[in-house]
Image (spheres, rainbow, N blue to C red):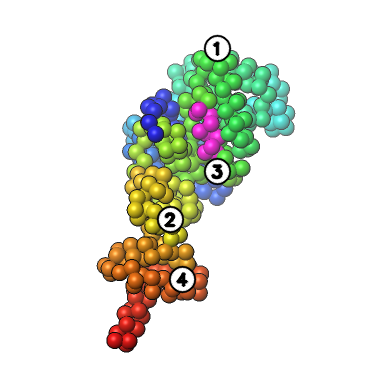
Amino acid sequence: MEKESVTQVIVDDTTLRDGEQTAGVVFSRSEKISIARLLDQAGVHEIECGIPAMGKEEQSAVRALVDLGLRARLITWNRAIVSDIRASIECGVSAVDISISVSDIMIEHKLRKSRDLVIEQLKTALGFAKEHGLYVSVGGEDASRAETGFLLDLLRVCRSLGADRFRFCDTLGILDPFAMHGKIALLRQSVPEVDLEVHTHNDLGMATANALAAIRAGARFVNTTVNGLGERAGNAALEEVVMALKVACGMETGIDTHRFLQLSRLVSKASRRPVPPWKAVVGKRVFAHESGIHADGVIKNPKNYEGFDPSEVGLRRYLVVGKHSGTSGIIERYQSLGITLAREEAERLLVGVRTLAERLKRPLSDSDLRMLYGEITDSLVAVA
């Protein structure tokens, strides 16, 4: 597939904000610094780094990140309240997200306001931020359930007061990619002067797909978190969005994907949230092959069963020997142990491999394989 340059797509990673909002997750200051540095080294364009309005400790942590002098732009999350924005200014950031609920259900039952009052509140907060020279993303909480006409009114306010972009949030993760594409395309066409950002949640397992659909429809900014951390079912995962753009869409973001495994493990340890072995892109065993047909195909040419080289994300290919293995996989796996098998030997071992794997209900370890090989060798010596 021919690659398309999409340097205009900006990845804004929110691991340090929405990722830390995962129930029970707390990052220490040193962990935040380590995560921010590695995100920056990987070339992530923006890092949403915290919520200064939470208090002195959070403000101190944000200032520590500012002092790192990263290449990535640091942006903080704020309610559409002047005091929140002032706290961000005091931390030394030059970019803020100003969030306000925009769906009727939240306006009535959460904010207990009217649409007109929401617009007035946004005008006050946005005007204050721009007066202080800040780069501003206006975050539309629950935009996926908002009335389209009201969203367009908000975008026009953003345009008139100089907002730099509007964040369309699928806060409850309820959209499908087709609906997401349609909504973003309409907003983009109606108010093209305001850049669009998309923030997707994974409640229905479609966060990555929705992020891609929004980009296809014209969104220039996309929010991600490492390993898909975030409220409830999490957000679109950094590693999934970037690799999907590259492999499925033919788009390059300029981010160094070779650091994804290191990032995944760092965030997993800091969040105390283990990454499942089958986790897309960075799971320990997503390049594991057991089935005889698959193992034979990948041995002949990895492209037969791998959409991209595992080394692109810091992983390696792994041949599993178990119930579904074939002779090619067994020969290759024994070769990695320094044992060269003739095909006839592999066929004899295959019976023992399948029997033992069924009994143990797991793939065979190196010691299991050596034991089986020893048994076959001993039986041949006894016959001789």
State the residue position of label 4: 354
Amino acid type at image mark 3: Gly
Amino acid type at image mark 2: His
Q: Secondary structure at mark 4?
A: helix
Residue 86 visible within the image: no
152 versus 251 height, above or below: above
Examine the residues drawn in magenta and state their main secondary structure: helix
**Residue 49 is drawn in which quadrant?**
top left
State the residue position of label 2: 294
Amino acid type at image mark 4: Arg
Q: Secondary structure at mark 1?
A: helix
Tell which of 239 and 5 is nearer to you.
Answer: 5
Q: Residues within 10 Å of mark 2 (few under 14, many from 20)?
A: many
Mark 3 to mark 1 CA distance (whole Å): 33 Å
Q: Which one is earlier in the sequence, the residue at label 2 or at label 1?
A: 1
Tell which of 149 and 186 is nearer to you.
Answer: 186
| Residue 140, x across and y down, in percent | 59, 27
162 versus 101 height, above or below: above
56 versus 98 height, above or below: below
